[in-house]
Amino acid sequence: MRGWLRLLAWLSPLTLSLAPVPALANSCQRQEFEGVPFTLCEVTAADDLRLFLAGEKGVYGSFRAIDQALAAEGKQLGFAMNAGMYHRDRSPVGLYIEDGTELAPIVTREGPGNFGLLPNGVFCWSEGGFTISDSRKFAPQQGSCRYATQSGPMLLIDGELHPRFLENSDSTYIRNGVGIDAAGTRAVFAISDRAVNFHFFARFFRDHLGLRDALYFDGNISRLYAPGLGRHDGGFAMGPVVGTVIDKE
């Protein structure tokens, strides 16, 4: 018996090391990719994932303000992160749909900055699952989105990195974004815990997480609320925020 126990003890770590390491559904965890730490949170189409912009008192601007608003429903945030670029008044840059209502129109023209680095994209979801689409090809899907946020650039397009990304670029920031699986039933939100360039961030979604489509949310201002990890990033006020809603503990 002791021999079997010793064998099982030896095999267990090996088995764990060979197993895939996806994030747990609707929870957050830390992982490393080529020596760089990341924090990621995974949701499924069955989770209550929402976008948040403003309430009765105006733009929320913070995770705490959203949590306080949800408390009135007996709810709270499971996790949350900033979800796209915004103007000085914190209104969305590009398409923004919240609970079926379009609050900002889609923008398909090329322009300055990361948002205008085409192709940019739209992250859309409803009860049927998640999609990430090139904004210039998005129009036929627009009516089917309960929630949608536009940002840019795309990180992955059908498994390929954005054609403008440079492997050795010295433009590095803390960055965050979202990727989805091929079936559109799983979305993984990730933030780098060290400054990385676009090329490396996109490879994290493709080579480490095994995803085919991914969208950049922002850099430098990127923030995460993950109470299960004891993490609540502060800072200046945000625009759109994405997060899961769960029953209040």
Image (tube, rainbow, N blue to C red):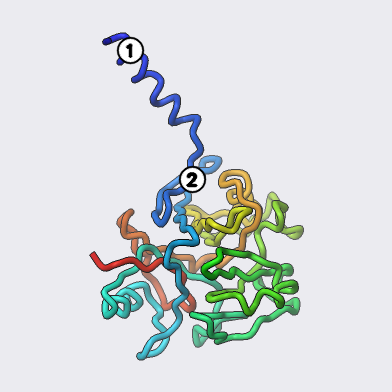
The residue singled out by tag 2 in the image is 22
Looking at the image, residue 231 sits to the left or right of residue 108; the answer is left
Q: In the rendered view, tell whether residue 247 sits above or below residue 28.
A: below
Mark 2: amino acid: Pro
Residue at disc 1, secondary structure: helix
Give how far apart the Cα atoms at labels 1 and 2 are: 30 Å
Q: Residue furthest front?
A: 128
Closer-to-camera residue (234/125): 125
Q: Give residue 29's mark.
A: none
Q: Give residue 4's mark.
A: 1
Q: Residue at x 63, y 71 (%)?
A: 122
Mark 1: amino acid: Trp
Q: Residue at x 51, y 66 (%)?
A: 220
Mark 2 Cα within 10 Å, few/some/many (few <14, many 20+)?
some
Q: In the rendered view, tell whether residue 208 sits above or below residue 10.
A: below
Q: Residue at x 39, y 25 (%)?
A: 12
- Hey, which quadrant is residue 137 in on the image? bottom right
Residue 127 on image: x %, y %: 52, 68
Looking at the image, residue 160 sits to the left or right of residue 206; the answer is right
- Hey, which quadrant is residue 132 in on the image? bottom right
Residue 226 on image: x %, y %: 36, 60
